[in-house]
Amino acid sequence: MALYGRLLYAWLLVLVFSLQAFRGGFAHSCCSDNNGGCDPNALCSEDPNTGAMTCTCNVGYANTGSDDNVVCTDRCTVNNGDCCPHADCSHDDATFDVKCTCKPGYTNRGSKSKVICTNTGSASGETDTVNIPADAEWESNGMTIAGGNGKGNAANQLFWPGGLFVDDNQTVVIADFGNHRIMQWKHCDRRSGKVVAGGNGQGIGLHQLNLPTDVLIDTKTNSLIICDWGNRRVVRWSRHRDNTQGEVLISNTQCWGLAMDEQRNLYVSDIGKHEVRRYRLGEQTGTVVAGGNGCGCGNALNQLSNPTYLFVDREHSVYVSDKNNHRVMKWKKGATQGILAAAGKGFGCSPTQLNSPQGLFVDASGTVYVVDSANHRVMRFTKRDTTQGTVVVGGNGAGALANQLITPFGLTFDQNGKLYVVDNNNHRIQRYSLQEHC
């Protein structure tokens, strides 16, 4: 009887196979035939209810086609896999996900997930090579890293600070305008700073400063170069401990902003002559490289009106905050007129406007960061759209809260992409960290 049951079961299986064959075979997923027509580097999936197929590019590939016609392309061949210009794109051996690796001579100052490659050998005082991701965002609340203890001349105070410079060790030097001195704050000590130039009262002596507006560090000579605006001169102070006075580099200039290129040429904005000059160190006359074509009341492309802070890129193009024209101008090396680099729609508070721009920074991709002083904010303008900006920090009204500024002046970034802003009327320096996105 048991043998008969087993034979009956075997016969039923044969019958089922025959019926399936008669109906066209066993039901199977369309994805099993030629990957469902999907790209070879895509995963084919089928909805069990509707039978609809979906093609999804595998890790390490990007869809360069459309939703209906998925074409999977190696991500490293598309915009360098979103790696920065100074990084090589490759794939992880285990996951095949994109991996960004800084090129020789560059160091990752960001994180494993957000690689920011900067020139390992770039010296303070030279043009910067910080590459900031296009989608970078900063914390809205700044951290006070210098000053912030009211207006005054104590070691933990500032008085209307102007320009600043941050070295590779995150040491900050600040033009303490109202105190006629240059202050230095070490990264490890935010409680108080140290006078490193001036601080001997307002005056014209070599041991004194008069309303300094900007400062940079020249590591070649281990010295500070200072816009001594009230004395109409540019001076150099050694950073050696026993130094008690400076030396005059340039006279008869209403210097406001400073920059230095990798050849150690010095660039100086003159708000009285409405021009920017380039000087070889030791030279007194210099060469006009921007502006100098009018009385300061013009807004033609070959004119500037009260130029304040500067930035010089690796091609020696000069970016200028054209304060009274409420715009940022770019003058290429040897050019007879500038091109618009940011805003230029008159003064105002819309995203297309600036109001008395001051501090200025340009990253390796050509994105302009500018202090929109009278609007109490920092703006960003990309190369793709120089007229439409976005607010980076501030823009929450004038105030002393952590997310507010009052008439900011100087601006810079460190090698880790942290943003430093001189909060002039709050007599403090604010630092903003990059937001981390998982």
Image (cartoon, helix red, strand yellow):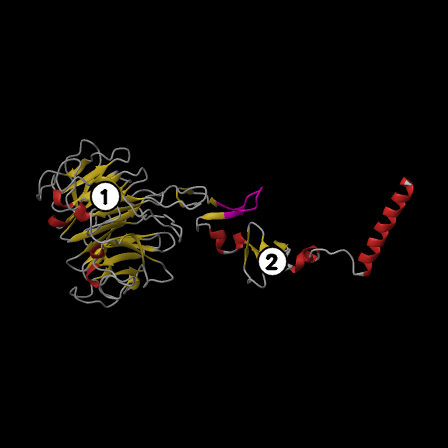
Residue shown at 45% from the left, 41% from the top:
112
Residue 122 image offset from top left, x and y in percent:
35, 43
Residue 402 in magenta stretch: no
Q: Secondary structure at mark 2?
A: strand
Residue shown at 62% from the left, 60% from the top:
52
Residue 50 image offset from top left, x and y in percent:
63, 60
Residue shown at 9% from the left, 44% from the top:
204
- Hey, which residue is sitting farthest top in the picture? 242
Q: Earlier in the sequence, mark 2 or mark 1?
A: 2
Q: What residue is pinned by disc 1?
A: 429
Q: What residue is pinned by disc 2?
A: 54
Q: Which residues are magenta?
A: 89-100
Residue 353 image offset from top left, x and y in percent:
26, 62
**Residue 183 horizontal side relative to residue 391, left or right:** left
What kind of residue is marked 2? Answer: Thr
Distance in Å between CA atoms under marks 2 and 1: 53 Å
Residue 97 in magenta stretch: yes
In depth, the one of 316 and 180 nearer the eye is 180
Residue 308 image offset from top left, x and y in percent:
21, 55
Q: Is 126 above or below relative to 156?
A: below
